[in-house]
């Protein structure tokens, strides 16, 4: 399998979740063991130098957790507000069709650690920018952001100056 082969595993779903949005469904990729294995192996190669892997709920968990487990690195969850117990830090953000708040538990990331963020889709970049701000607030350094898919038309890359961004698929 090659990176170019992955596009056939992404379905375009018009008007989901709201009219005018063209949702990119990664379910066909997840349902194909060979494609999923290939993607995880690619992400592992890019994330090897991380001290910590961070991923947002829910689809960032799908890729970030196996990468962290195979590399024997911690995985830190980022979730919507009031979904994590204990003391959390929070960041408000906007994305293609809504506004939201993200939270991360305190004392999971420490000053000076190298963090790699893994998520499924880069569109406007709002979600990941909020995660970067959460990580930086803990004194850690985001070295890379890895996406399965980048929606080039949204120009989300503009939010990540000075951080390496890797997208396995560009559409």
Image (cartoon, rainbow, N blue to C red):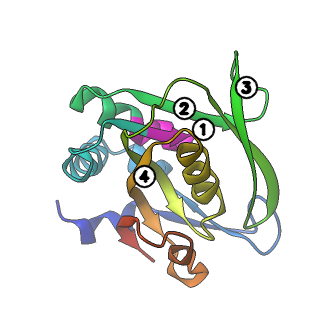
- The residue lying toward the viewer, choosing from 96 and 130, is 130
Left or right, 148 with respect to 80, comes to left
Of marks 2 and 4, the one in the foreground:
4
Side of 46 relative to 26 (left or right): left
Give x and y (percent) for residue 29: 39, 51
Residues under numbered marks 2 and 1 in contact, where contact means CB atoms less than 8 Å apart = yes
Mark pair 2, 4: CA separation: 15 Å
| Residue, disc 3 | 83
Residue at horizontal 60 percent and vertical 52 percent from the top: 133
* Element class at badge 4: strand
Q: Tell me if residue 81 comes above or below residue 171 in the rendering.
A: above
- Mark 1 — residue? 57
Q: Which residues are magenta?
A: 54-64
Picture residue at 50% right of the left edge, 25% below the top: 108
Q: Are marks 1 and 4 in contact (CB under 8 Å)?
A: no
The residue tagged 4 is: 142
Q: Quadrant of the C terminus?
A: bottom left
Mark earlier in primary sequence (2, 4): 2
């Amino acid at each position: 399998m090659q990176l170019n082969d992955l596009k056939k595993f992404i379905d375009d779903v018009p008007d989901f979740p709201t009219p005018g949005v063209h949702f990119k469904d990664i379910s066909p990729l997840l349902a194909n063991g060979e494609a999923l294995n290939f993607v995880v192996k690619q992400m592992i190669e890019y994330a090897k130098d991380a001290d910590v892997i961070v991923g947002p709920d829910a689809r960032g968990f799908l890729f970030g957790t196996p990468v962290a487990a195979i590399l024997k690195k911690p995985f830190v969850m980022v979730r919507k507000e009031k979904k994590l117990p204990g003391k959390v830090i929070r960041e408000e953000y906007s994305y293609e069709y809504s506004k939201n708040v993200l939270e991360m538990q305190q004392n999971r990331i420490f000053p000076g650690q190298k963090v790699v963020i893994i998520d499924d889709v880069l569109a406007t970049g709002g979600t990941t920018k909020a995660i970067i701000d959460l990580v930086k607030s803990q004194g850690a350094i985001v070295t890379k952001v890895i996406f399965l898919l980048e929606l080039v038309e949204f120009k989300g890359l503009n939010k990540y100056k000075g951080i390496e961004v890797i997208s396995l698929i560009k559409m």
